[in-house]
Amino acid sequence: MTAPALPEPSQPSPSPETEQPALIVIGSDDAPTCTDGACAW
Amino acid sequence: MYIDVWSDVVCPWCYIGKRRLETALGKFEHAADVELRWHSFQLDASHPQGHRAPVQEMLAKKIGAPPEQVRAMTRQVSELAAEEGLTYDLDNAVSVNTLDAHRLNHLAARHRLGDAMHERLLKAHLSDGELVDDLDTLVRLGAEVGVPEDEAREVLKGTEYAAEVDADFAEARRIGVNGVPFFVLNGKFGVSGAQSAVTFLSTLEKAYAKGEE
């Protein structure tokens, strides 16, 4: 007699963070910004 | 339509980016439907509160460059600012911790004065040589744009809105913002840095069209 098959593990629900679509970033990569403590002077 | 903007009041590119966005909005057919929401991003949250240093001196120390090289760098950004109609005076700008300025900006936003307040704070630091960590200065700057003086003083004496400043920074990190200015249109389109007005306008049009779908 074979043991009954174990139920498939349920998939974890995606967190709100992973549900949110990534931003579509527009524009050139070299537009000047300031980052932590330093600016593209 | 809404635009979320992460910025610091001591960020020279943020003021330039703000002007370029405004130029684009001036040409955007649906500008009246656009709401700007300013979010806090402290470029140097570790800057000790109460510590003040001339920007030129702070930069020289940070990048290990001689004063003449620092002056050349700040002159260059000032020239670009001038192209947008802004008068920078970085020789007299003073580097400070910006937490209280951001807390004031959150209070102003509650009065629907967030954009005017951010504009005034940027100008205060980058053009007017104001101390944007000084209680009386902040209360005065707030009053200039319509924030009730008593309320501003009470908020600034305490810690109100510090959690909102932290939350803005955490949200920036969560969506991958590493530098400012950073603009998010309708939660879908990101624009990093002081892009050209042409780029802002085309992104406004894309975001609006996407929102209409």
Image (cartoon, rainbow, N blue to C red):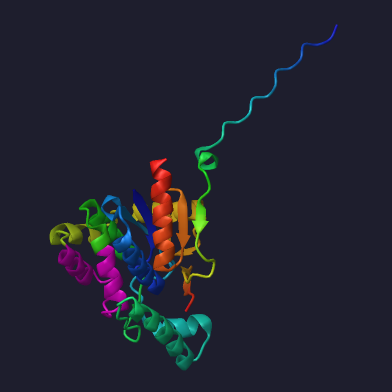
Q: State whether the magenta stretch is mostly helix, strand or loop.
A: helix
Identity of the residue drawn at 50% across and 63% down: A27
How many numbered dots are placed on residues in this image? 0
Identity of the residue drawn at 43% across and 84% down: B76
* Residue B204 among magenta residues: no
The range drawn in magenta is B117-145
Q: Please, is residue B93 above or below residue B28 in the view?
A: below
Q: Please, is residue B37 above or below residue A12 in the view?
A: below
Res A17 visible:
yes
Res B181 visible:
no
Q: Nearer the viewer, residue B131 or B115?
A: B115
Q: Quadrant of the C terminus of chain B?
A: top left
Q: Please, is residue B97 above or below residue A3 in the view?
A: below
Q: Left or right of B182: which side holds B115?
A: left
Identity of the residue drawn at 21% across and 72% down: B137
Identity of the residue drawn at 52% across and 66% down: A28
Residue B114 at x, y percent in the picture: 26, 58
Q: Please, is residue B144 above or below residue B51 in the view?
A: above
Residue B147 at x, y percent in the picture: 17, 59
Q: Left or right of B69: which side holds A8?
A: right
Residue B198: name its quadrant: bottom left
